[in-house]
Every structure is written in structure tokens, then in C-alpha cells.
Image (cartoon, rainbow, N blue to C red):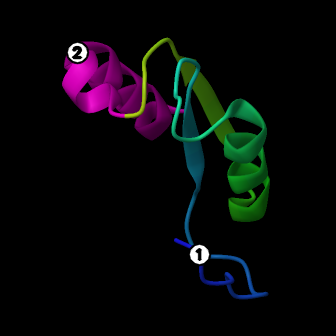
């Protein structure tokens, strides 16, 4: 995750799910990652670093929302 991303955009739709109580990745760093990916879709989830373990149903809803958007 520390390697530079390519200058060319990824040939797919991109989204980013931010975790608002993440002590590993602060909000400012997550925002930078979302911008670097050129994420057209973002959503916040009130969890720590592993939302799929902490709130699996809410994570699944967020992913489904992204896929349906």
C-alpha cells in the first residue's frame, strides 16, 4: 500500500469506505487515499480499522450501495 500508484486512472469504477473511528488510519489519511484513487463514491462507517469484523452487516450494505450506485 505504500507504493506509488500509476499516473493513468484505473479502468474501473472506484469507491472508498471511510472508517470514522479508525486509530490505524486517521480521517485525513483516508481522505488522501480516496483522492489518490479518484474515488467517485465514498461513504462513512462508524467503526474502527476492520469494519467487516466489527459491523459486517453495515459493511455489506455499504458495498451493495456502491455496486448499485
Q: Is residue 33 left or right of residue 49?
A: right
Quadrant in the picture for the C terminus? top right
Q: Is residue 38 left or right of residue 11?
A: right
| Magenta span: chief secondary structure | helix
Image quadrant where residue 55 sits:
top left
Would you say residue 42 sits in the magenta stretch? no
Q: Residue at x 53, y 18 (%)?
A: 21
- Helix, strand or loop at disc 1? loop
Q: Residue at x 57, y 58 (%)?
A: 13
Would you say residue 63 sits in the magenta stretch? yes
The residue where tag 2 is placed is 57
Q: How many other residues sit within 10 Å of disc 2, few (<14), some (14-19) or many (≥20)?
A: few
> Looking at the image, is 51 positioned above or below residue 16?
above
Relative depth, front residue between 26 and 68: 26
Residue 2: give its label: 1
Q: How many other residues sit within 10 Å of disc 1, few (<14), some (14-19) or many (≥20)?
A: few
Image quadrant where residue 59 sits:
top left
Separation of residues labelled 1 and 2 (CA atoms): 29 Å
Q: Is residue 17 left or right of residue 39?
A: left
Residue 48 horizontal/vertical position (percent): 43, 23
Q: Is residue 60 left or right of residue 35?
A: left
In the image, which residues are magenta? 50-69
Q: Residue at x 26, y 30 (%)?
A: 52
Q: Nearer the viewer, mark 1 or mark 2?
A: 1
Amino acid at each position: 500500500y505504500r507504493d506509488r500508484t500509476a499516473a493513468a486512472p484505473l479502468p474501473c469504477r472506484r469507491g472508498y469506505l471511510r472508517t470514522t473511528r479508525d486509530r490505524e488510519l486517521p480521517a485525513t489519511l483516508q481522505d488522501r487515499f480516496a483522492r489518490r484513487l479518484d474515488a467517485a463514491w465514498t461513504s462513512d462507517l462508524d467503526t474502527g480499522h476492520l469494519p467487516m469484523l466489527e459491523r459486517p452487516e453495515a459493511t455489506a450494505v455499504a458495498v451493495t450501495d456502491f455496486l448499485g450506485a
